[in-house]
């Protein structure tokens, strides 16, 4: 069991990725609005000088926000299937920075429920 994280910088692919999740029966995901370090530095007053050389060119000037999507996938083969499907969705992009994916092993899931109050 592992959690798949997708940091999506090009939000034009978000709907297609979510549709693919449904099609592949990914049972749920959480999405967070996120901002990368490069954007945070650019937005900080007086720190624009830190961005120079190739780092500056890798930052899409129109990109303000990103989404971080994560989902727990019980089977390893399913993770590979989802990763391959997401790669296929974005493979024809002309943008230099679309995002990235990574997985982290999950050793357990612990649901949180309120204690039942009996009357």
Image (tube, rainbow, N blue to C red):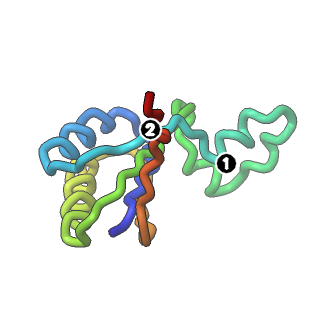
- Is there any visible trace of residue 96 in the rendered image? no
Residue 73 is tagged as: none
Secondary structure under badge 2?
loop
- Residue on which the image places disc 1: 37
- Taking the spot 64% from the left edge, 54% from the top edge, the residue there is 55
Secondary structure under badge 1?
helix
- Taking the spot 45% from the left edge, 68% from the top edge, the residue there is 104
Mark nearest the camera among 2 and 1 is 2
Left or right: 11 in relation to 42? left
Q: Residues within 10 Å of mark 2 (few under 14, many from 20)?
A: few
- Asked whether the beta carbons under mark 2 and mark 1 sit within 8 Å of each other, the answer is no
- Is there any visible trace of residue 81 in the rendered image? yes
Residue 5: x %, y % from top left: 42, 55
- Residue on which the image places disc 2: 116
> 14 and 45: which one is in front?
14
Task: State which quadrant residue 10 falls in.
Answer: top left
Residue 74: x %, y % from top left: 27, 64
Left or right: 77 in relation to 12? left
Residue 86: x %, y % from top left: 26, 52
- Taking the spot 27% from the left edge, 33% from the top edge, the residue there is 15
Spatial CA distance of label 2 from label 1 is 44 Å
């Amino acid at each position: 069991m592992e959690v798949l994280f997708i940091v999506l910088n090009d939000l034009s692919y978000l709907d297609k990725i979510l549709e693919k999740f449904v099609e592949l029966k990914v049972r749920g995901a959480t999405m967070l609005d996120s901002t990368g370090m490069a954007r945070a530095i650019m937005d900080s007053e007086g720190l624009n000088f830190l961005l120079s050389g190739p780092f500056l060119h890798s930052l899409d000037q129109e990109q303000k926000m990103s989404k971080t999507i994560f989902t727990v996938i019980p089977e390893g083969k399913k993770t590979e299937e989802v990763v391959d499907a997401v790669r296929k969705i974005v493979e024809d992009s002309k943008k230099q920075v679309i995002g990235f994916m990574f997985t982290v092993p999950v050793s357990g899931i612990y649901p949180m429920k309120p204690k039942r109050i009996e009357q």
